[in-house]
Each structure stands twice: as C-alpha cells, then as structure tokens.
Amino acid sequence: MIYAVGWLVAIAVFAIAEAATVALVSIWFAAGGVAGLITSLFTESLWVQLLVFFVVSGLLLAATRPLCKKFLSGRAQRTNADMVIGKEGTITQAVDNLAPSGRVFVCGQSWAARSEGGETIPQGAVVQVCRIEGVRLFVRPADGGSR
C-alpha cells in the first residue's frame, strides 16, 4: 500500500503522455501501472510490483502493438499524379524542351509534358510517362510509336 500513490502518479503520467500524442505510445504502460497498483494492494515488495508492471506491459505491448500498428497506419494510397507513372499517353501538343512546350493526354487528363531524353516528340506520338516534377510529366517515346 506504500507504493500506491507512486503507481497512481505513474498511471497519470502514462495516460497524459498517451493523450498528448496521436499514436499509441504509452497505453500499455498505463495498463501495467494499473497492474502494479493492484499488486501493491497485496504485497509491499516493490520488486514484485515492478516485475508485474514490466510483465503486464510487455505482454500487452507484444500482443497488441502489431495489431494496432496495422490498423492505425492504414494503407499508403497513391495519388492521382503517382498513378500516371509508367502509363502510356498521347502527345496533344508537340513536346519541345527548348520552346518549352508540350502536352500529353494520360489517364483522361491533359498534362504539361517535357521530353525525358531532350528530343522533340511530335503531336500524335505515343509516349510513356517516366516521372513527375511538380505538374509536369517527363515522357519518352513508347515502343508502339503513334496511334
């Protein structure tokens, strides 16, 4: 019973730390603190209380952390811009890096385009998207030629 106040303080600290963050950080230790508090009602041995605290915290952490991490992290969703990389499109305005001019129609959208290799690409040519910089697609002629 001597250490009950210490366990209450520890529980409050862990709970405040958990409330202050958006990720699960210390909830397991707050539960371990509760186990330590309950243990303090039955024994005055600090070592036994600490052992119970660490065992309960460790078991809860090992059992629930992977599950919580899976549900809280979610799945990384590619943006619309990322989805066009590797896709083929049609040049709607000739691509000339020196001008600078060029437009490409990819996945139902018209984008500003530049040539990946620096060559001029004529209107109507089929191209493949190599990368994106800002709102500009860098393309190269596709193996298929023009449509």
Image (cartoon, rainbow, N blue to C red):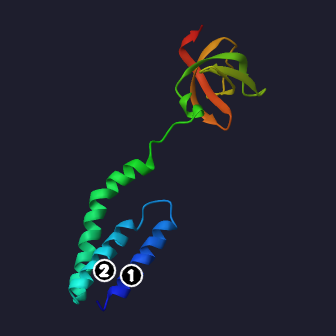
Task: Classify 10 Å Cα crowding around label 2: few (below 14), some (14-19), many (20 and above).
Answer: many
- Would you say the residues marked 1 and 2 are in contact, meaning their CB atoms lie under 8 Å apart? yes
Q: Secondary structure at mark 1?
A: helix
Residue type highlighted by circle 2: Leu
Residue type highlighted by circle 1: Leu
Instruction: Give the residue at x 48% y 72%.
Output: 16
The residue where tag 2 is placed is 37
Q: Is residue 142 above or below residue 86?
A: above
Q: Secondary structure at mark 2?
A: helix
> Where is residue 130 shown, x and y percent of the image?
56, 29
Image disc number at residue 53:
none
Task: Classify 10 Å Cα crowding around label 1: few (below 14), some (14-19), many (20 and above).
Answer: some
3D distance between C-alphas at marks 1 and 2: 7 Å
* Nearer to us in this view, 45 or 78: 45
Image disc number at residue 8:
1
Instruction: Give the residue at x 70% y 13%.
Output: 123
- In the picture, measured across the screen, residue 7 lies left or right of residue 99, that is left
Task: Give the residue furthest to the bottom.
Answer: 2
> Where is residue 40 shown, x and y percent of the image?
26, 84
Instruction: Give the residue at x 30% y 80%.
Output: 37
Question: Which quadrant of the rendered structure holds the C terminus?
Answer: top right
Q: For residue 45, what is the image quadrant?
A: bottom left
Instruction: Give the residue at x 30% y 92%.
Output: 2
